[in-house]
Image (cartoon, rainbow, N blue to C red):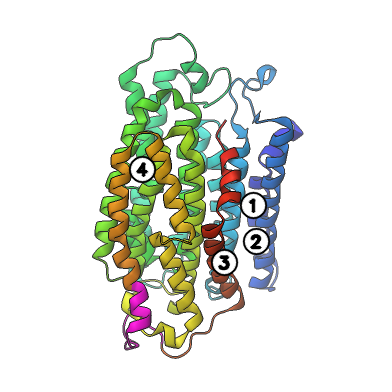
């Protein structure tokens, strides 16, 4: 193991040290949450800078394979890959995690000393998310997935104030464990089919398909199916989405943004790393399966979202639809990866903004948040109503927002790959999705304030903290800017292809 190996996992090391430092400070002093905020913020900033540096490193040195199991031939069975793909993922994940934590920091303040545990778990979850994107071995990817998942299971039920929060965390844990078992079974079958769990290197899966060997097609197809199902759960694609509505509703307002946005980025990055990076030669086998899952996701997500009267559950089901839209890009293989990146990053930023607003209005509580509780928001807080309207229009895909640009690029990628029928399904469901997004805006501007006993309702003027306000308006500004000028991010995304 050399210095370059350590630099390849510098972001993960930074976040691990940050988590340890937060716990040590909490145990050894009474400084309080201000110190935890500085440590968490500095850890995420350093991890982000390491990812930027890794991008420049790849520019000059090319992609790197690290932690090879065979020292004389270090690229034979590598564990870590550093390329533009992993660097871009790090920049996105650490940025989204930073603004998500900042937007929900009042939740940490209200937890007392337990807030340090929450912050440490969040940092460990983020480290696991990034490790999912730069893993060059399926076993390591599984360990990274579990690192992120176990931390998020605890975060989902962390407040322990309401019964539905505990139920949501337990449901998340049970279904997540089942999905993890499916994923690791897929890893075992992939080993049986190819003789390796490494994605790259001279003894890896990618090299296996370049050699003249007998391929057990049935085992390989089953392996790919199980890997897709395991990661499909993490990104809440249908029909693997059952956990999302309960977890979104039951988790504390300041925690949902991290769970919803960060996991989407990491999950789709891992999916693209496996399918496009190592199994691209099997494109004709897995692309139709992704197309069917994408179509099912947009239909199921939109249909159930229309029926919801709780805003968190509505966003959970709309997240299922958005997972379908993102997956639509990947049916183009490598050509769809830039569109996937653009969509998942802009969607994550929009989602953080929306859930920060929900947390502010709902007082960072767990439980239900009825859409009716937004009634009269334009009178109580015109700025929050405006911000929520812009973000809802973006999620709906209205022109001059990042949501429109992201849908345009994923549909273009699908048409290029010959999946016109999938684009038609996406367009129809996108039009249907206008109902629940515009309904939310209408409630804010055209309904009188509701009684205080409506879940999530707040009376009088709403006070927005400095950190939350900054996060909300950064999300709004990014949404508008990327809707008007998406080319800079798209250009970066075009270089962020898996090795």
Regarding mark 4 in the picture, which secondary structure is present there?
helix
Q: Residues within 10 Å of mark 3 (few under 14, many from 20)?
A: some
Q: Residues within 10 Å of mark 4 (few under 14, many from 20)?
A: many
Q: Which residue is mark 1?
A: 15
Q: Residues within 10 Å of mark 1 (few under 14, many from 20)?
A: many
Residue at 30% across / 20% down in the picture?
218
Q: Residues within 10 Å of mark 2 (few under 14, many from 20)?
A: many
CA separation in Å, label 3 and label 1: 28 Å
Viewport quadrant of the N terminus: top right
Q: Position of residue 120 (x, y in %)?
A: 59, 58
Q: Which residue is mark 4?
A: 179
Per the rendered image, the range of residues in magenta is 440-458
Q: Position of residue 253 (x, y in %)?
A: 45, 69
Q: Is 457 one of the magenta-colored residues? A: yes
The answer, for residue 377, to whether it is visible in the render is yes
Prevalent SS, magenta region? loop
Regarding mark 1 in the picture, which secondary structure is present there?
helix
CA separation in Å, label 4 and label 3: 36 Å
Q: Is 41 one of the magenta-colored residues? A: no
Regarding mark 2 in the picture, which secondary structure is present there?
helix
CA separation in Å, label 2 and label 3: 24 Å
89 sits left or right of 48 in the view:
left
Identify the mark nearer the N-term, 4 or 1.
Answer: 1
84 up-or-down from 78: above or below: below
Identify the mark nearer the N-term, 2 or 1.
Answer: 1
């Amino acid at each position: 193991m050399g210095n370059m190996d350590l630099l390849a996992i510098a972001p993960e090391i930074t976040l691990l040290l940050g988590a340890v430092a937060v716990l040590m400070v909490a145990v050894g002093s009474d400084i309080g949450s201000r110190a935890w905020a500085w440590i968490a913020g500095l850890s995420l900033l350093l991890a982000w800078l390491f990812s930027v540096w890794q991008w420049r490193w790849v520019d000059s040195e090319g992609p790197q394979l690290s932690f090879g199991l065979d020292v004389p031939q270090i690229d034979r069975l590598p564990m870590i890959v550093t390329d533009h793909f992993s660097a871009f993922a790090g920049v996105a994940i650490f940025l989204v995690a930073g603004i998500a934590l900042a937007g929900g920091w009042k939740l940490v303040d209200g937890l007392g000393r337990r807030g340090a545990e929450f912050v440490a778990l969040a940092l460990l979850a983020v480290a696991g998310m990034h490790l999912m994107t730069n893993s060059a071995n399926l076993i390591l990817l599984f360990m990274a997935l579990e690192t992120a998942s176990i931390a998020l299971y605890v975060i989902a039920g962390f407040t322990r104030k309401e019964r539905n929060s505990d139920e949501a965390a337990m449901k998340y844990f049970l279904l997540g464990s089942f999905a993890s078992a499916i994923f690791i079974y897929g890893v075992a079958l992939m080993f049986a089919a190819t003789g390796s769990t490494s994605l790259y290197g001279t003894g890896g899966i990618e090299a296996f398909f370049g050699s003249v060997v007998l391929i057990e097609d049935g085992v390989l197809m089953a392996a790919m199916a199980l890997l897709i199902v395991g990661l499909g759960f993490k990104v809440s694609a249908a029909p693997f989405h059952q956990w999302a509505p309960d977890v979104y509703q039951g988790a504390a307002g300041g925690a949902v943004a991290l769970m919803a946005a960060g996991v989407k980025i990491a999950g789709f990055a891992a999916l693209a790393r496996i399918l496009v990076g190592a199994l691209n030669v099997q494109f004709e086998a897995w692309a139709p399966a992704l197309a069917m899952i994408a179509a099912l996701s947009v239909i199921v997500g939109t249909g159930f979202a229309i029926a919801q009267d709780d805003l968190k559950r509505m966003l959970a089901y709309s997240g299922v639809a958005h997972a379908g839209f993102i997956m639509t890009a990947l049916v183009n293989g490598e050509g769809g990866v830039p569109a996937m990146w653009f969509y998942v990053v802009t969607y994550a930023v929009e989602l953080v903004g929306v859930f920060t607003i929900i947390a502010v209005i709902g007082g960072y509580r767990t439980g239900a948040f009825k859409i009716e509780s937004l009634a009269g928001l334009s009178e109580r807080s015109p700025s929050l109503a405006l911000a929520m309207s812009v973000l809802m229009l973006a999620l709906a895909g209205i022109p001059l927002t990042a949501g429109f640009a992201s849908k345009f690029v994923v549909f273009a990628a699908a048409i290029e790959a010959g999946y016109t029928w999938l684009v038609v399904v996406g367009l129809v469901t996108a039009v249907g999705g206008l109902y629940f997004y515009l309904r939310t805006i209408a409630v804010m501007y055209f309904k009188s304030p509701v009684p205080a006993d409506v879940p999530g309702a707040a009376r009088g003027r709403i006070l927005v903290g400095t950190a939350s306000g900054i996060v909300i308006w950064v999300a709004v500004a990014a949404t508008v800017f990327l809707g008007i000028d998406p080319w800079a991010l798209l250009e970066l995304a075009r270089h962020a292809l898996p090795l």
